[in-house]
Amino acid sequence: MNIKPSLLALVISATVGVGAGVSAPAFAAAKEDAMRASNDSRTLTQLIETALANDASRKQFYAQSQAMREMGIASTTLMDPKLKVGVGGFPIDSFQFDKDPMTNISLGLMQQFERGDTLALQGKKANQQADGVQLQVEVRERDVANAITQLWLELGYQQQAERILHENQRLLRELTRFIQTNYSMGQNEAQDLLNAQLQVSKLDDKLNANAQVQRRIVSQLSEWLGANWLAGAHELEASNQLNWQALTDSSIQTQSTEHFSQLLQHPMVKMADVAITTQQTQVEIAEQAYAPQFGVEVMYGYRQANGMNGQPASDLVSAYLTLDIPLFTDNRQDRNLAAAQYQVGASKSQKDLLLAQMNAKVNALLVDKSNLEQRLSRYENTLLGQASARTKAVERGYQNNTAQFSDVIAAANDELTLSLEQQRLVTDLNLVNSNLAALLGGLNYNANTPDIAVPNLSSTSTSQTTTKQ
């Protein structure tokens, strides 16, 4: 085994330099990644804001909330008055209006009024429901921002892995060419050349699989960014680590197991609060059922016949007041009120359950965060250094004919694996931070009001009037 020690040392040391936290080039690359983090965050923020502007689900929730507000205005309006036109006391023997003084042509107007403050409370309830649906817009914004951030981090990991694999492949190809030259001169064994060629082919396969994963991730991003964006997304440069200053500013208490004060600001918890107030309003509406409901009717009767004294009969005016008096409330009003009160209790229990579930998620994520940070520290302070020392030891053994070339390749592969695992841990840590930010409000984006078409009510009314005519 007469491979030149200088070239082998160059190849192995360059391969070792791939591992972050081991060599000077790795430290420089890590520093460069940190400097790029802010630029990557800005690019990611732009993608998130573009996705939110294009998100159809977000527009749907906003339109539904506006629809509920419009329905709330409609629900606070009195029922349309009813017009009543007819003939009373019409004689069937003569079929004439001026023969019998009892005959009159009646024109009446009837108006029904709701019980107590029912109308105002219905409008209040509709606005509360609209607030709840509008909070779904914020929930959707967080979901989209978190989904895109996670895809961005995964894409950044794949691109980082691609750079590591390309560098190792380049070094192995250089080594393969040199071994081939020595083999042609009878200075290396065939198994060394075949082993080196096999490692290069394996890296080719890993790079092909990596490219496939990258294309799939970019395709997933097109769900929010559109097919046109996908056509020009070939030069997208992502990162597997971001600046989580906003999450740090949220003052997460890692030593505490209760995070309810931060979770109360989450839109889903606010939706639970709105559901409670909506049900409380429904209790007030149910209480209005004990108030009487009344209506007013006014009628005017026109008479053409003469009275019994031979003079023209006087026209008639009638007025009526109707009352719907709830006297028997056991099976209707009482039951509806009890049902509404039970719904309030159910909504409160639902909020408690939601907070418990979200708090458990935060605690689980904090455990993952702590564990990943410890593992990263172990990789940077122990594992990568040990892998580097092992590679150098195997190199010396190969130069002294006490180790096989396969041992050199195995040591280089182990260090490559550790480098990729370290980047995987960095990515997983950032994924955990993204999930924490989605729960505690550390995602960075600005969302504008969804752009939806506003109905032209005047033209609609004109069209309906034209149709009726």
Image (cartoon, rainbow, N blue to C red):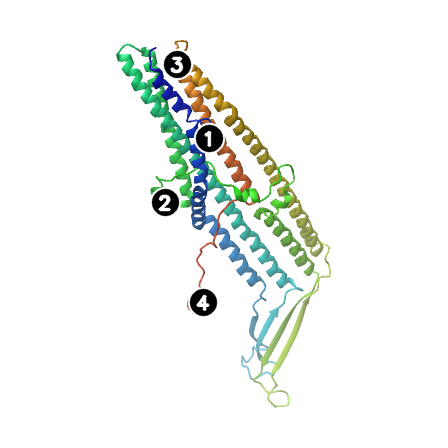
Question: Can see residue 151?
Answer: no
* Residue ID for mark 4: 458
Instruction: Tell me, yes or no, whether the two marked residues, 4 and 1, touch with CB atoms within 8 Å.
Output: no
Of residue 89 and residue 341, the one placed in the foreground of this image is 341
Q: Count neighbours of disc 3 (C-alpha within 10 A) and say few if under 14, some if 14 to 19, many if 20 or more.
A: some
**Is the C terminus in the top left, top right, bottom left or bottom right quadrant?**
bottom left
Between marks 4 and 3 in the image, the one whose residue lies nearer the viewer = 3
- Above or below for 178 versus 24: above
What whole-number distance in Å separates the C-alpha atoms at marks 2 and 4? 38 Å
Q: Quadrant of residue 115?
A: bottom right
Label 4, secondary structure: give it: helix
Residue 388's disc number: none
**Residue type, label 1:** Gln
What whole-number distance in Å separates the C-alpha atoms at marks 2 and 1? 28 Å
Instruction: Tell me, yes or no, whether the two marked residues, 2 and 1, touch with CB atoms within 8 Å.
Output: no
**Residue type, label 3:** Ser
* Residue ID for mark 2: 229
Residue at the image point whose x is 50% and y is 51% from the top: 61
Q: Earlier in the sequence, mark 2 or mark 4?
A: 2
What whole-number distance in Å separates the C-alpha atoms at marks 4 and 3? 82 Å
* Residue ID for mark 1: 423
**Residue type, label 4:** Ser
Residue at the image point whose x is 62% and y is 54% from the top: 278
Q: Count neighbours of disc 2 (C-alpha within 10 A) and say few if under 14, some if 14 to 19, many if 20 or more.
A: some
Question: Can see residue 246?
Answer: yes
Between marks 4 and 1 in the image, the one whose residue lies nearer the viewer = 1
